[in-house]
């Protein structure tokens, strides 16, 4: 029951976006010379990893995710010694955001006998995972909203980032730390979103000794002032927003209109490049819980931009590209001591025994895929998220690690 509730919450919070990535600055200043570091060429035999992406369809274009992963492979082979010394290659398949495409990609991976399938983010991840698990192929995601994946066994399913922490449990902790006792959760009034939030919010907020006030808003509501004012009148001392950029822009406008001065908390999908202008700086001071540090002054972010410039010039560096890059580099960082052939079995052994390791672009967040991080979703590899604060241009800064472990308990 706990796992089903958990995954419903994640779906409700993240269904508004195809990626669990933060909205941040697209470009950074110049880093110290040679931000790529010291070259360390991979010299061992080639190991071909599976990469499944939704790619491009009529509705989406996730091809930057593929380019980000391919850039990470080239960088790892040139500067990180590959995967435990082995040269990395990718077997890439696109689902085209269809179940049939996902099934075909899973079949492709099984036939290719890849040792692991990496699917950074996907609307078809459950189908992909189901298709490869029978063949004993481990499965890695940057972030997942799929119930089947989140409930998968820790020994073969690895979800690097903590979507629960950023979507629901984390806001309760932010409110607690600010001394707030009641939080208005603004969420779209559709069953897939408001239903699970209503059911699950009390479980996590109880751990923070904070009362949730779930405020449902009709889909497409342009003026949320009545709902926000009702929340203020009802004693809400903070607001948390669960929705996409259009939803949250309307929410922020309403929050500013009523003159609310308490904490406002967002998920990364709340902000896009148009948000700052749409709210006339209204995002200033809003807290965001995310998984990537995109501060232009962050040296690791500068290095990422340098990698993309060298190996994927002209490709969009925000959005899903980051998830593709992080997924590859995280696997490399997790398995430096893998010996012998790279197989499904040696990867599973290495992941099970890996120590806590800094998450690429994580700004101090660590991951450890031993099944002991989140008791109700053992496939999640971290209890930590990043808390940041938006400026007037909706660019996040002042990043700090926020551990949600004490909030992720049921019972």
Image (cartoon, helix red, strand yellow):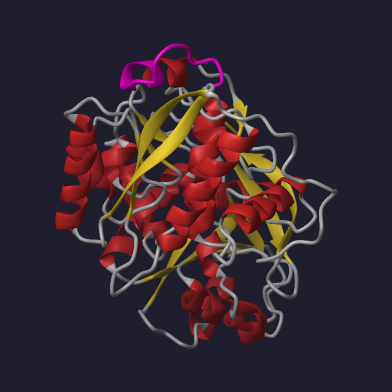
Residue drawn at x 41%, y 62% is 63
Q: Is residue 411 left or right of residue 181?
A: left
Residue 301's spot in the image, x, y percent? 70, 51
Q: Quadrant of the C terminus?
A: top left
Residue drawn at x 48%, y 36% is 408
The quarter of the picture where residue 24 lies is bottom right
- On screen, residue 160 above or below 252: above
Residue 326's spot in the image, x, y percent? 54, 44
Within the magenta stretch, is there residue 96?
Answer: no
- On screen, residue 397 above or below 345: below
Residues drawn in magenta: 336-347
Q: Quadrant of the N terminus?
A: top left
Q: Is residue 163 left or right of residue 134?
A: right
- On screen, residue 74 above or below 335: below
Residue 90's spot in the image, x, y percent? 39, 41
Residue drawn at x 42%, y 47% is 120
Residue located farthest toward the top when viewing the structure as drawn: 340
Q: Nearer the viewer, residue 163 or 188?
A: 163
Residue 226's spot in the image, x, y percent? 50, 84
Q: Is residue 408 left or right of residue 279?
A: left
Residue drawn at x 53%, y 47% is 325
Q: Is residue 368 visible?
A: no
Secondary structure, magenta segment, majority class: loop
Within the magenta stretch, is there residue 337?
Answer: yes
Residue located farthest toward the right when viewing the structure as drawn: 32
């Amino acid at each position: 029951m706990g796992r089903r509730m958990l995954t419903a919450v994640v779906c409700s919070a993240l269904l508004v976006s195809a990626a669990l990535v933060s909205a941040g600055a697209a470009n950074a200043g110049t880093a110290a010379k040679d931000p790529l570091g010291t070259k360390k060429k991979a010299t061992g035999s080639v190991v071909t990893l599976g990469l499944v992406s939704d790619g491009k369809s009529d509705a989406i274009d996730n091809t930057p995710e593929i380019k980000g992963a391919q850039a990470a492979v080239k960088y790892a082979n040139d500067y990180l010694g590959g995967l435990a010394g082995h040269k990395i290659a990718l077997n890439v398949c696109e689902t085209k955001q269809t179940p049939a495409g996902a099934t075909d990609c899973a079949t492709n991976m099984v036939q290719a006998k890849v040792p692991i399938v990496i699917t950074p983010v996907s609307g078809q991840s459950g189908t992909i995972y189901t298709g490869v698990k029978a063949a004993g192929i481990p499965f890695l995601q940057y972030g997942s909203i799929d119930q089947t994946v989140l409930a998968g066994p820790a020994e073969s399913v690895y979800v690097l980032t903590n979507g629960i922490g950023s979507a629901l449990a984390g806001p309760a902790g932010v409110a607690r730390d600010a001394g707030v006792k009641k939080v208005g959760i603004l969420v779209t009034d559709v069953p897939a979103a408001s239903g699970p939030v209503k059911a699950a919010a009390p479980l996590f907020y109880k751990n923070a000794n904070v009362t949730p006030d779930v405020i449902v808003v009709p889909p497409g509501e342009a003026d949320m002032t009545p709902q926000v004012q009702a929340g203020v009148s009802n004693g809400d001392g903070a607001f948390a927003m669960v929705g996409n950029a259009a939803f949250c822009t309307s929410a922020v406008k309403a929050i500013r209109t009523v003159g609310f001065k308490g904490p406002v908390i967002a998920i990364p999908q709340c902000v896009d490049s148009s948000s700052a202008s749409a709210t006339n700086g209204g995002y200033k001071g809003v807290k965001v819980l995310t998984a990537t540090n995109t501060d232009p002054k962050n040296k690791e972010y500068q290095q990422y931009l340098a990698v993309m410039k060298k190996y994927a010039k002209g490709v969009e560096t925000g959005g899903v590209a980051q998830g593709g890059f992080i997924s590859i580099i995280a696997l490399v960082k997790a398995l430096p001591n893998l010996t012998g052939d790279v197989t499904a079995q040696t990867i599973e052994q290495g992941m099970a025994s890996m120590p806590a390791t800094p998450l690429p672009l994580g700004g101090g967040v660590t991951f450890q895929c031993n099944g002991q991080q989140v008791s109700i979703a053992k496939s999640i590899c971290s209890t930590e998220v990043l808390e940041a604060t938006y400026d007037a241009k909706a660019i996040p800064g002042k990043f700090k690690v926020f551990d949600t472990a004490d909030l992720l308990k049921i019972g």
